[in-house]
Amino acid sequence: MILKKITFLILLSLIITNISKSDFKDIKKKAIINKPEIIFQIQKDKKGCIKDLYVSPDKNYVLPVLKVEAPSGYGLDNRFDYALSKFEDFSFPCGSGNVEACQNVKRVILEWAKADAAKRTGPSDGEGRHWNDTLTVNLYIASPMMAAYSFAKQVIVISKSEDKIIKDWFKRIVRKNKHLMYEYSNYKTGSGANGTPKRAHNHALSSAVSHMQLGILLNDSKLFRTAFKNFEAAIRYQRKDGSMPIETRRGGRAMFYQARAMNALAVIAILAENQGYNVWNYEHKGKNYHNIVKFFIDFTENNEIVFKYAKSMKHPGPAKNYKRQDLNSRSSSNWGWLYAYASRFPDHENVQRLKKWSQDKSNLNSYQWDIVHHYLKIGKRPFGSASWTVVEPNCHFTK
């Protein structure tokens, strides 16, 4: 009798897994745009949103930066990060439906489009400058400006001529900064990520997010579906413990980069959800997004679990000590994914674990304190910035 029950549960598990694979396969091949131009919907409940325009538009200059000049070593072109920080003063309240903010979002984007700004003139050789230039544009300009433009179109009227200028510019910068890595070979022995396809890399995921958003703006379903190939690779090629091989080899920034990849995956899932598709539960041989989240939570309880991967010290940037993981407690790029995940899966054992920790904080370490802090903040206070989350997560990630 017990053997029959075990056999039944195994069969049921296989059936559920196959359904998950079948559904995802159909979405990957056949999904269409059901809500053209709606990248993120303006929320009705704005409790976790920035609603007011706190800056004077005539003093908050978001001047076009014409050419991308990222370093060939570690890092991005920080002029664009600065421009994004100024642009968010308009885009965040626009995302809450503030008319004046949306008017300024349109004005800034139109200025950048007319100037043909964020032009990449560097090589497309797969070397460091190429990687850093493309991420600079996808992360700081293309994704956040497309999302903000979608908000603006939900609030104000934009002329056909201006709409064309803006969309043509978006097409140019997304395609010129395409870095989906489909043509690259898998990582080799000694890389710390042996056998993992490069399309699972956080840079590739960022490019995929830009393509997905452009597809929604242009009502181009094929372009929209692009991101699912990268999403699938990131889920399939995680390790059994939920660690992401490409990201966790990166020394003191192993979890820093795992978090960024988790954010990009969350954005792809939310954009799909906003068009009527559920990819959150895509699973391959027991590997899914829940498992990736579990590893992150496991890490907060015992940070040593990442050391065996992080000690590879592949491109750690300034974080040279792999035993000291660089996770800024205030950065949405480290924690934004949690707002999407916990608000959708409040009863999952991962989230219940955080709930239990939040009820007795006396024995928590610093990493646990940080994740519990964000868990308790969901739906309450907004972040002050967004890059890997594209939009303000406590407003547009929560469900």
Image (cartoon, rainbow, N blue to C red):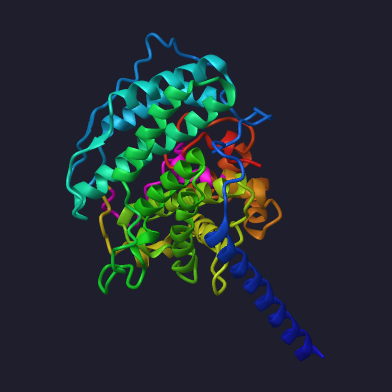
Q: Quadrant of residue 177?
A: top left
From the image, which quarter does the N terminus lie in? bottom right
Left of 164 or right of it: where is 250?
A: left
Span highlighted in magenta in the image:
319-338
Q: Is residue 310 above or below residue 33?
A: below
Residue ID at (37%, 10%): 59
* For residue 67, above or below residue 60: below
Identity of the residue drawn at 64% across and 53% down: 351
Could you tell me which residue is drawn at 48 percent across and 68 percent down? Answer: 236
In percent of width and height, residue 302 lies at 48, 60
Residue 324 relative to residue 366: left or right: left
x and y, in percent, of residue 384 in the image? 48, 29
Q: Which of 294/272 is in front?
A: 272
Quadrant where the C terminus sits is top right
Classified by dominant secondary structure, the portion drawn in magenta counts as loop
Residue 9, image x, y percentages: 73, 80
x then y, percent, for residue 381: 59, 30
Q: Which residue is drawn at the image coordinates 42% and 47% (left, top)?
A: 211
Q: Quadrant of residue 374?
A: top right
Does residue 329 appear anywhere in the picture? no
Q: How many marks?
A: 0
Q: Is residue 31 left or right of residue 73?
A: right
Q: Residue furthest front?
A: 161
Whether 321 is among the magenta residues is yes
| Relative height, residue 15 to residue 152 (above, below) | below
User: Is 48 covered by the magenta stretch?
Assistant: no
Q: Nearer the viewer, residue 206 or 342?
A: 206
Q: Relative to residue 87, is residue 265 depicted above or below?
A: below
Look at the image and tell me whether residue 325 can be seen. Answer: yes
